[in-house]
Image (spheres, rainbow, N blue to C red):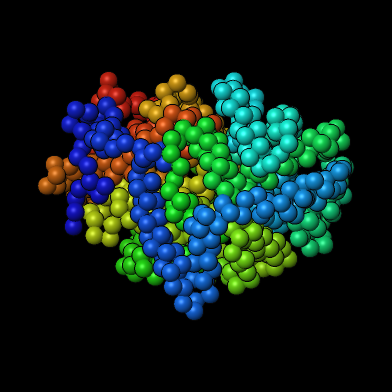
């Protein structure tokens, strides 16, 4: 058994944990490691992703060299080989792009525009409106189409209006012109101007990211007649048919942003069709460029990599090929990955961790002074119905309908169309509660409110998050707190709107809702305006990050309680060979998993769009927890000190 947390760099003796736990734990690593030239950020998650990437590389290269008789291996090998044959891609030139551009050239009115966006959307081209098939929040036993705002080439609407993004917006216009010119567009400068006009117009109708977090406000069921009334200039039938939806698919749909539908309908009336063609041409080129010749690939990276994330170098081609396979054939790769890299003993250890985390939540709910017995009963019922999924799915996606041609862009389009058909095919059928929305080789985890489930792919179950042979303090401070975080999303400011069945239902008493909102508002205010190491000139948006901050702090507190359940007080307070108590190792493990650095551009991009706080602030969020102050004897005047009255712990 090891007591020192994995990802084993020494603690910084010049920084006291009482002043900056994150720095105490991670400064030595941060000072000795440079962000690789092909990355915008680098830390624990990225190191693990590199390991997973190398593991997947071995799988796909073996499949490319000798696929044998396995149909999935043939698809993996075939698509990877097409991507890696850069000379063949170069020789094909713009010919593979021509059928997509023909769709653009055929646009002569609003209806033909919508038909083109549907057909091209199936191939992976961004459109005016994104259809997403998911369980109905009002009736989680049925699938329904959600209608999501879309149409922008920059990360979100704030890039078109916020002065802090002005430099990026100016650069974006140049990138649009360059890529269009490389794709054979005549008068690319004028076309780029038209693209910006259209995207500015679309952005004015978009809901901002904070408002989009409101699960109730973004649940707007509409009948086909109501959709027609909201957006009379949007030919819903033509658009749905172009996407391949069955008749009646939009008889009941969920509009996530109804005002956008109204704004879009007006734009369809008022924007000149030539500008719409320019906009669609751009989005075809933007989606297709990574799968075309070198000049287009490089120009696309200049936008997506250098300008938006500050990344100086393009990733190696094999890495981009692995990413393509992850998106196109993720389950086929995942099945082979699990066979090689997911030991059975991990499952048993994770089951025990989850059991202790759930028990810690039970005890927490029972002891909450601000929550009534009525709401506690509902919360406990939701907790009891949680479904944990660990490692890999019990059933894999079927790719047998995918036929590869050997042309890279064509085959990427076919893979996207197969995925679209798979999603659309859910409509009218039973809900598949075994489905995963991440592959096993993904270093991440998630909570799905519509199915009330927490999911932990195999690839995150490795040090420093998890090690079956490690000291429990390390595991509970790492993956244990992450489990607590994901369970906590079921009770954060968004997840708390869903009940144990996955239905959007208000199960809170009015008084409890007021108390919960007050606590969430305090946490929102605590983080709002904070500044991180990686972007000291930009402030954190407390409203955008509040849900993840609830998850972090609640997950950490519950993770610590679960650790105490697992080992008892004596082990948690005893000093080990490393000079740390078990409780101290727990919090060190927590801070260690958030170790990472980011380039300025990437840090600023994340502050604008990411609902997670910067990594150093996440690592130091433990200042809200009494057990942290006790473990390190933090005193008033220390950097990590937070007055007890200012500590916010919801669960």
Image point (70%, 68%), residue name? 429
Vertical arrangement, residue 599 with respect to residue 376, above or below: above
Q: Position of residue 544 (x, y in %)?
A: 54, 33
- Specify whether residue 90 is in view: yes
Which residue is painted at 78% across and 38% down in the image? 276
Q: Position of residue 431 (x, y in %)?
A: 64, 65
User: Quick check: can you spot residue 511?
Assistant: no
Residue situated furthest left in the rendering: 577
Q: Picture coordinates of residue 214 (x, y %)?
A: 63, 39
**Among the 4 quarters of the image, the one containing residue 584:** top left
Q: Quarter holding the C terminus?
A: top left
Report the side of 327 relative to 21 (left or right): right
Q: Is residue 169 left or right of residue 535?
A: right
Q: How many marks?
A: 0
- The picture quadrant where one finds residue 234 is top right
Q: Residue furthest front?
A: 91
Q: Nearer the viewer, residue 499 or 230?
A: 230
Foreground pick, 507 / 149: 149
Q: Position of residue 471 (x, y in %)?
A: 23, 54
Quarter of the image where the N terminus is located: bottom left
Q: Residue at x 62, y 50 (%)?
A: 93
Q: Residue at x 80, y 58 (%)?
A: 241
Could you tell whether 353 is left or right of 71 in the image?
Answer: left
Up the image or down, 257 lies above or below 451; here it is above
């Amino acid at each position: 058994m090891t007591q020192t947390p994995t990802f084993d760099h020494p603690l910084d003796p010049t920084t006291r944990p009482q002043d900056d736990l994150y720095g105490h734990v991670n400064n030595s690593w941060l000072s000795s490691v440079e962000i690789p030239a092909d990355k915008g950020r680098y830390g624990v998650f990225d190191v693990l992703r590199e390991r997973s990437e190398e593991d997947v590389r071995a799988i796909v290269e073996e499949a490319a060299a000798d696929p044998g008789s396995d149909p999935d291996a043939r698809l993996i090998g075939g698509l990877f080989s097409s991507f890696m044959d850069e000379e063949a891609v170069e020789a094909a030139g713009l010919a593979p792009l021509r059928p997509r551009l023909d769709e653009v050239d055929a646009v002569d009115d609003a209806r033909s525009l919508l038909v083109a966006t549907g057909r091209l959307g199936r191939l992976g081209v961004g459109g005016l409106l994104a259809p997403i098939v998911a369980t109905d929040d009002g009736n989680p036993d049925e699938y329904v189409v959600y209608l999501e705002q879309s149409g922008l080439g920059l990360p979100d609407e704030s890039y078109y209006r916020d002065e802090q993004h002005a430099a990026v917006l100016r650069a974006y216009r140049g990138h649009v012109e360059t890529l269009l010119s490389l794709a054979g567009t005549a008068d690319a400068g004028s076309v780029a101007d038209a693209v910006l006009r259209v995207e500015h117009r679309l952005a004015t109708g978009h809901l901002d990211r904070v408002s989009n977090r409101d699960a109730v406000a973004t649940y707007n069921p509409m009948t086909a007649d109501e959709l027609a009334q909201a957006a009379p200039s949007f030919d819903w039938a033509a658009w749905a048919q172009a996407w391949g939806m069955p008749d009646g698919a939009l008889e009941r749909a969920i509009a996530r942003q109804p005002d956008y539908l109204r704004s879009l309908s007006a734009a369809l009336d008022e924007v000149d069709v030539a500008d719409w063609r320019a906009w669609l041409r751009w989005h075809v080129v933007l989606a297709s460029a990574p799968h075309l010749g070198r000049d287009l690939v490089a120009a696309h990276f200049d936008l997506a990599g250098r300008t938006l994330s500050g990344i100086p170098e393009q990733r190696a081609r094999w890495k981009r090929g692995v990413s393509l396979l992850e998106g196109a054939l993720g389950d086929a790769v995942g099945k082979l990955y699990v066979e090689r890299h997911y030991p059975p003993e991990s499952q048993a250890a994770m089951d025990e961790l989850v059991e202790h985390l759930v028990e810690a939540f039970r005890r927490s709910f029972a002891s909450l002074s601000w929550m009534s017995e009525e709401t506690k009963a509902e919360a406990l019922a939701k907790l009891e119905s949680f479904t944990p999924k660990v490692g890999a799915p019990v059933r894999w996606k079927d790719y047998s309908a995918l036929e590869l041609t050997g042309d890279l862009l064509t085959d990427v389009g076919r893979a996207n169309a197969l995925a679209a058909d798979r999603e659309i095919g859910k409509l009218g059928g039973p809900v598949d509660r075994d489905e995963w929305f991440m592959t096993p080789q993904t270093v991440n985890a998630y909570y799905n409110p519509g199915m009330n489930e927490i999911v932990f792919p195999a690839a995150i179950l490795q040090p420093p998050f998890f090690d079956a042979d490690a000291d429990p303090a390390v595991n509970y401070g790492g993956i244990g707190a992450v489990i607590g975080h994901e369970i906590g999303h079921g009770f954060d400011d968004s997840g708390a709107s869903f009940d144990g069945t996955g239905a959007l239902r208000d199960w809170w008493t009015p008084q409890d809702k007021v108390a919960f909102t007050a606590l969430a508002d305090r946490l929102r205010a605590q983080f709002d305006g904070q500044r991180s190491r990686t972007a000291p000139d930009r402030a954190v948006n407390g409203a955008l990050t509040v849900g993840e901050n609830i998850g972090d702090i609640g997950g950490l507190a519950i993770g610590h309680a679960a650790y105490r359940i697992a080992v008892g007080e004596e082990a948690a307070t005893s000093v080990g060979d490393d000079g740390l108590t078990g409780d101290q190792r727990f919090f060190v493990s927590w801070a260690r998993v958030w170790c990472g650095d980011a380039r300025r551009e990437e840090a600023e991009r994340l502050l604008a769009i990411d609902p997670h706080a910067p990594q150093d602030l996440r690592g130091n969020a433990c200042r809200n927890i009494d057990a942290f102050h006790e473990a390190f004897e933090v005193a008033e005047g220390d950097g990590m000190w937070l007055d007890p009255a200012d500590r916010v712990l919801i669960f």
